């Protein structure tokens, strides 16, 4: 089954990190990604939420607003698509994502039609 | 440019899906098919390559945190919001304008929202 792992963390503390500190986190992500390689079906780091754009269509009119759709304490900073046997396996893998140590990893299973 | 498009369903719409019988749900899906097909047709015409996933029930979400080497697992989506993530597209678009063009054609945009997040360079 495919499970989307959304990585939420405090964007402002990330932006305060020095280049060396960031490189350390990137190294942790690279080692996670190489260790979990067979169980990863995708993943990306997102640009900061200030680059987000939200689109809604009501009564045939498109409204475009800057920023994410919801203000949250932590912000979505990236994701992985996990290819696993169960949600428990996804949970074990999620605990190894570096962001789980300071932020939150949210797991969302694919709809059954997709998983089949 | 690569963009992640987060397809957020209106919470009330998600709840109403739950009350449908399998046949009613299938009928409602069938009603939406032409709009999705129009979107996929537009993507093909524009040469926009997409990948994506439709997600299952947000109530079955799991939240994982690790603090002091201890793994904490809780149920439910991370954020309590009026709209809930129902799926995503990862699209290779020319620019943000094209991503907005795409977003406004997604059926979900008429009841919920589509959030566009550029992938970090």
Image (cartoon, coloured by chain):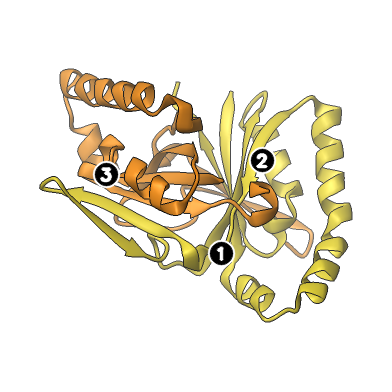
Chain colours: A orange, B yellow
Viewer-proximal residue among A62 and A24: A24
Mark seen at residue A100: 3
Q: Chain of mark 2?
A: B
According to the picture, the residue beneath numbered tag 2 turns out to be: B100
For residue A60, which quarter of the picture? bottom right
Disc 1 to disc 2, how far (Cα)?
26 Å
Q: Residues within 10 Å of mark 3 (few under 14, many from 20)?
A: many
For residue B69, above or below residue B121: below
Labels 3, 1: one chain: no
Disc 3 to disc 1, how far (Cα)?
22 Å
* Secondary structure found at label 2: helix
Q: Nearer the viewer, mark 1 or mark 2?
A: 1
* Secondary structure found at label 3: helix
Viewer-proximal residue among B28 and A40: A40
According to the picture, the residue beneath numbered tag 1 turns out to be: B57
Q: Position of residue A6 (x, y in %)?
A: 42, 46
- Tell which circle, 1 or 2, labels the residue nearer the N-terminal end: 1
Q: Chain of mark 3?
A: A
Q: Position of residue A25 (x, y in %)?
A: 23, 26
Relative to residue A18, is residue B16 drawn left or right? right
Disc 3 to disc 2, how far (Cα)?
31 Å
Labels 3, 2: one chain: no
Question: Cβ–Cβ below 8 Å for labels 3 and 2?
Answer: no
| Whether residue A57 is visible | no
For residue B33, above or below residue B24: above
Q: Chain of mark 1?
A: B
């Amino acid at each position: 089954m495919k499970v989307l792992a959304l990585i939420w963390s405090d964007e402002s503390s990330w932006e305060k990190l020095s280049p060396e500190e960031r490189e350390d986190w990137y190294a942790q992500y690279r080692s996670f990604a190489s260790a979990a390689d067979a169980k990863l079906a995708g993943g990306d780091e997102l640009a900061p939420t200030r680059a987000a754009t939200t689109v809604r269509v009501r009564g045939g009119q498109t409204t475009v607003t800057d920023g994410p759709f919801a203000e949250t304490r932590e912000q979505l900073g990236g994701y992985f698509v996990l290819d696993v046997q169960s949600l428990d396996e996804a949970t074990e893998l999620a605990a190894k994502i570096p962001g789980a140590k300071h932020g939150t990893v949210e797991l969302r299973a694919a709809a059954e039609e997709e998983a089949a | 440019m690569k963009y992640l498009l987060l397809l957020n369903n209106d919470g009330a719409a998600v709840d109403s899906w739950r009350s449908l019988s399998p046949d009613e749900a299938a009928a409602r899906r069938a009603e939406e098919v032409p709009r999705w097909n129009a979107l996929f047709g537009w993507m093909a015409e524009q040469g926009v390559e997409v990948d994506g996933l439709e997600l299952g029930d947000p109530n079955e979400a799991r939240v994982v945190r690790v603090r002091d080497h201890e793994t904490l697992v809780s149920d439910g989506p991370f954020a309590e919001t009026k709209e809930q993530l129902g799926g995503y597209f990862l699209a290779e678009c020319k620019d943000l304008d094209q991503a907005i063009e795409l977003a406004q054609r997604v059926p979900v945009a008429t009841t919920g929202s589509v959030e566009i997040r550029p992938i970090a360079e």
